Amino acid sequence: MAIPDFARANFETLMKAAKAGDLALMECTEVASGETRYVLCAVGRDDDDYVMTPFGHLAPGNPYEAYIPPA
């Protein structure tokens, strides 16, 4: 299974942020469910403001039970 270009580009951006120490874990509310999620974000700057770019949330519970790797 090939990884789509958008996912690869997002991963590369995430890796650059990690190498620069520009990652944050934010507590957010999921729009669809209203549940609390812990979201991994890249931190950027826009003049004096911080810009948080969300990449995904951490899996609650046991992530080994939530995902199946490709066969």
Image (spheres, helix red, strand yellow):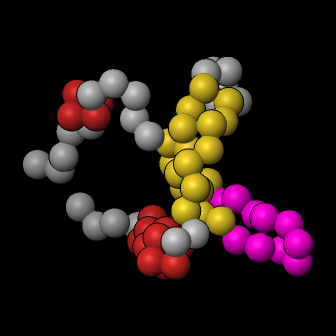
Task: Residue 26 in the image: state x and y as whole percent.
Answer: 62, 44
Which quarter of the figure has residue 53? bottom right
Quadrant of the image occupied by residue 29: top right
Residue visible at 88% across and 72% down in the picture: 48
- Residue 15 placement: quadrant: bottom left
Residue located 40% across and 28% down the image = 60
Tell me if residue 52 comes above or below residue 9 in the rendering. above
Q: Judge whether residue 47 is colored magenta.
A: yes
Q: Nearer the viewer, residue 10 or 26?
A: 26
- Where does residue 66 sit, x and y in percent of width and height? 29, 30
Picture coordinates of residue 24, whole percent (x, y): 58, 55
Q: Position of residue 31 (x, y in %)?
A: 70, 30
Which stretch is magenta?
44-53
Q: What residue sits 54% from the left and 38% below the top?
A: 38
Q: Is residue 34 left or right of residue 18?
A: right
State the residue lying farthest toward the right.
48
Magenta: main secondary structure: strand
In this rendering, the answer to whether 56 lies above or below 43 is above
Numbered circles on residues, count: 0
Horizontal relation, residue 25 to residue 30: left or right: left
Residue placed most toward the observer, 19 or 70: 19
Residue at 60% x, 26% y: name it. Answer: 36
Horizontal side of 45 relative to 66 (left or right) equals right
The answer to whether residue 61 is seen in the rendering is yes
Say if residue 12 shows up in the picture.
Answer: no
In what quadrant of the picture does the N terminus appear? bottom left
